[in-house]
Amino acid sequence: MDAPAPIPRGGLIEGAYREHSRKVLATLIRLLGDFDLAEEALHDAFVAAADRWPREGVPGNPSAWLVSAGRFRAIDKLRRRARFRAMEPELAEQIVSDAEEGEEMADAVIKDDQLRLIFTCCHPALPQPAQVALTLRELCGLTTEEIARAFLARPPALAQRIVRAKARIREERIPYEVPELSALPERLDAVLRVIYLVYNEGYSAHSGTELIRADLSAEAVRLGRLMLDLLPQGETMGLLALMLLHDSRRDARTTPDGEVILLADQDRTLWDRALIEEGFGLIDRAFATRQIGPYTLQAAIAAVHTRARTADETDWGEIVGLYDVLMRASPSPVVRLNRAVAVGMHQGPQAGLALVNALLEEGDLSDYHLTYAAQADFYRRAGDKPAARQAYEQALELALQEPERRFLQKRLQELGEGGGGTS
Amino acid sequence: MKYMFLIYLDEAKFAPMSQDERDGFVNAMLDYDEELRASGNYLISEALKFPSEAITVRTWDGSLSTTDGPFAETKEHLSGFHIVEARDLNEAVALAARMPLSRVGSIEVRPIDHLERIEK
């Protein structure tokens, strides 16, 4: 028929979509005051580009061209639709005049628009799963189906989460703005939490969906870099450093068949030196800001591991010290557990056991498989095989991911063969 | 990705409308199709005649049996469909929400599946 082809998947326009679509969307949301309207305008802008760029050449400033094409078409559509929807004319005129007056594309404005989009997607009025879904779709450009697959959710459930989040932004009139200085630390924290959650979702993936979920880590690192560019605060640096240092071990942390290799047993020559150097540089910059928060401290702990040429050379005393500071900055049961492990490495298994057992007695983390895995490891090293066996079995009952389960089963078998007692 | 919009309408909702209002929907739906064509989302759409004009066919035991009308008696019935190309499910939902008939009917948004021959 006479319908133009949908946006082509290959070549010029697809490359432009990857490069410009998120920035253009961020600005269109400001100009049009509505997510859905802006997404429609973005789509129309690329339809226009697919029609004109191959004939007329790519414009000098593609982003600005796309913004004004999208804005023009949105205004045109609003006027035409207003004819049918009786309630809309004044509203449409309002949006039209706002959009016509909105300022164009200075570099600082583009950066601010991206920040506006990030802070709106991660607004505390939205439930956290909605923040994550919106961030991945609007900011990273993933499709609903891709996000659903990565989080093992059904696409209609995820689509509705996004629809409701947008409705909430509209109904509660969540402003499209960068928070004021006084609210910034708290709001930045929410953004960084979403990024780290996305990272961990990718990092902890070992199962059949591994490839897709590993992409989540790459998206999180990309978001971390974007935040560093837009808002270079101490914790922004700390989080990116933490993700890069974890990422540097990607090739060393599993066998080719996907078995887990613990930090102590990894081939350290496989660690990515470039990511490590970048991470170290960011930690130095973060400490220099003197706003040292939980992400920077966790990155510093990861850096102590990274500096040790062999596992035996690890400076556990320094790690315990950093955990002490982290416990003050951001106390949580998981931090306590990690500190207990570090103490066990520094002062021996009995000291670690005392801390883990205290944690369990208080009821914290008593349904977390890693608590029992740590306990089992201490018992094993202390030579108490029956207690170690029991703790490994409890860990197995709670562990969900196959590679972790295989690892625990292997440890259990080793106990049975009488090989326990040494580490 | 391709999605189908199945448009379910309850005729009773149109009964109290004036002819003008009903004509308005017809023209607005044609405008909507135009808009989908212009944005490159449009693949195909058709309106369907009333279920009273339909026959349901089965050959369950090898012989042909036919009944009047659709399979079940419900208030809303299938009265048209679109097939669109959209980036993802949320874009499809946004397109469906813009359909004029979504104000009086229910639009089911279904991803189109792709069958591959199973070699034996």
Image (tube, grey):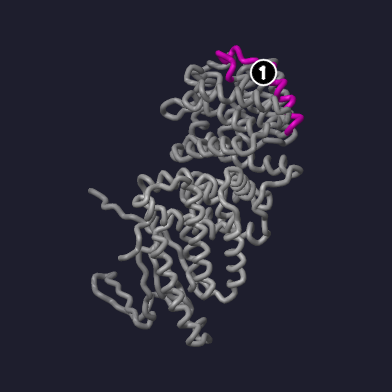
How packed is label 1: few (under 14 Cα within 10 Å), some, or many (20 or more)? many
Across and down, in percent, residue A129 comes to 60, 48
Residue type, label 1 = Pro
Residue for point 64% across, 25% down = A283
Tell me the subunit letter for badge 1.
Answer: A
Relative to residue A392, is residue B41 depicted above or below? below
- Residue A336 versus residue A84: which sits nearer the camera? A84
In this picture, residue A119 sits left or right of residue B114: right
Residue A264: give x, y in percent of width and height: 55, 19
Q: Name the residue located 38 percent from the left edge and 79 percent from the top edge.
A: B51
The structure residue drawn at horizontal position 53% and vertical position 37%, both measured from the top left corner, is A222
| Camera-nearest residue between B51 and A292 | A292
Check disc 1 and report the residue beneath it.
Answer: A349
Q: Which residues are magenta?
A: A306-331
Image quarter in which the C terminus of chain A is found: top right
Secondary element at image label 1:
helix
